[in-house]
Amino acid sequence: MSEHHSVPLKVYFAVFGALMVLSALTVGVATVHLGNPWNDVVALAIATTKAALVVMFFMHVKYSTKMTTVVVISSVLFLLFLLGFLLPDYLGRGLMPVLGK
């Protein structure tokens, strides 16, 4: 049986504070025009950071076994793999003329 890891309360408050700051940063970035792709890139970077904090601390992946870490990382890589297959189809839409028109 595995040993349970006790996380200090100050860690949860620090992560909560970081999530609140990142949420405010997301709202602030949404009101500023950074150029065509940059608003989306910055928003996705902030969202990825917030998701990583939630997974690591609130879902206890940081304190779990190495097998749990392997499963989480492999699932993220599998998601990126699937998105990599879908992206060429999405980006290629509208490049070829529609038949019959």
Image (cartoon, grey):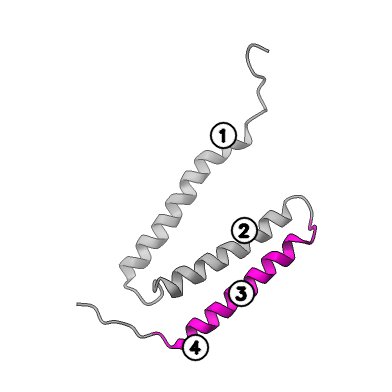
Pinpoint residue 91: horizontal percent, then vertical percent.
Answer: 63, 37
Magenta portion: prevailing SS class: helix
Q: CA distance from mark 4 to mark 2?
A: 27 Å
Q: Nearer the viewer, mark 4 or mark 2?
A: 4
| Horizontal arrangement in the rendering, residue 58 relative to residue 22 (left or right) | left
Pinpoint residue 56: horizontal percent, then vertical percent.
Answer: 45, 72
Q: Residues within 10 Å of mark 2 (few under 14, many from 20)?
A: few
Q: Which residue is mark 1?
A: 89
Q: Which residue is mark 4?
A: 10
Magenta segment, which residues?
Answer: 7-34
**CB of mark 4 within 8 Å of CB of mark 3?**
no
Q: Residues within 10 Å of mark 3 (few under 14, many from 20)?
A: few
Asked whether residue 44 is drawn in magenta, I would say no
Q: Nearer the viewer, mark 2 or mark 1?
A: 2
**Residue positioned 36% across, 63% down in the render:** 70
Looking at marks 2 and 1 on the same chain, the residue that comes earlier in the sequence is marked by: 2
Q: Nearer the viewer, mark 3 or mark 1?
A: 3
**Residue positioned 29% across, 82% down in the render:** 4
Under mark 2, the amino acid is: Leu
Tell me the element at label 2. Answer: helix
As rendered, which of 34 and 13 lies closer to the eye? 13
Mark seen at residue 37: none
As rendered, which of 20 and 101 lies closer to the eye? 20
Q: CA distance from mark 4 to mark 3?
A: 15 Å
Pinpoint residue 29: horizontal percent, then vertical percent.
Answer: 73, 64
Q: CA distance from mark 3 to mark 2?
A: 16 Å
Q: Which residue is mark 2?
A: 44
Mark seen at residue 20: 3
Q: CA distance from mark 4 to mark 1?
A: 46 Å
**Residue positioned 59% across, 77% down in the render:** 18
Compared with 98, 55 (above or below) is below
Looking at marks 3 and 2 on the same chain, the residue that comes earlier in the sequence is marked by: 3
